[in-house]
Image (cartoon, grey):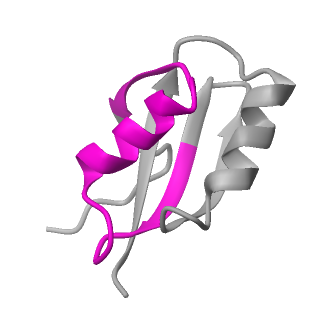
Amino acid sequence: MTLMEITYELQSRLQPEQLRALGSFANTYGLRRFRVDEQTNRLSFEYDASRLKETEVEHVLREAKIPVLRRVEPVGTVSQT
């Protein structure tokens, strides 16, 4: 298992039915924990990269009608050189 984290900017605040959709399909698709930051309007996911590609994560989110705009770097990320 190769765990990766990915963060997306959201087009709009998630509605209760969208949050339920996230909770219900998360483990099914190899998507693990998720966090919604309402202040920055971002959604972060941990996923199993040995099962899913980044493009598949985006596809699953869009199929669930999650208003994803684009991928962004998580706040507070430390880059290694």
Identity of the residue drawn at 49% across and 36% down = 61
Looking at the rendered image, the quarter that the N terminus falls into is bottom left
Which residue corresponds to the image point at 38% horizontal and 48% vertical from the top-left? 57
The segment highlighted magenta reads 44-71
Residue 17 image position (x, y, % from top left): 81, 28
Judged from this view, the residue extending furthest toward the right is 16
Q: Is residue 57 left or right of residue 28?
A: left
- Residue 10 horizontal side relative to residue 24, left or right: left
Displayed quadrant of residue 19: top right
Q: Quadrant of the C terminus?
A: bottom left
Q: Nearer the viewer, residue 66 or 3?
A: 66
Above or below, comparing residue 67 to residue 5 in the picture = above
- The question of residue 70 being in magenta is answered with yes
Q: Is residue 73 visible?
A: no
Q: Specify whether residue 18 is painted magenta.
A: no
In the image, what residue occupies the spot 63% across and 54% down? 25
| 14 vs 7: above or below | above
The answer to whether residue 52 is left or right of residue 44 is left
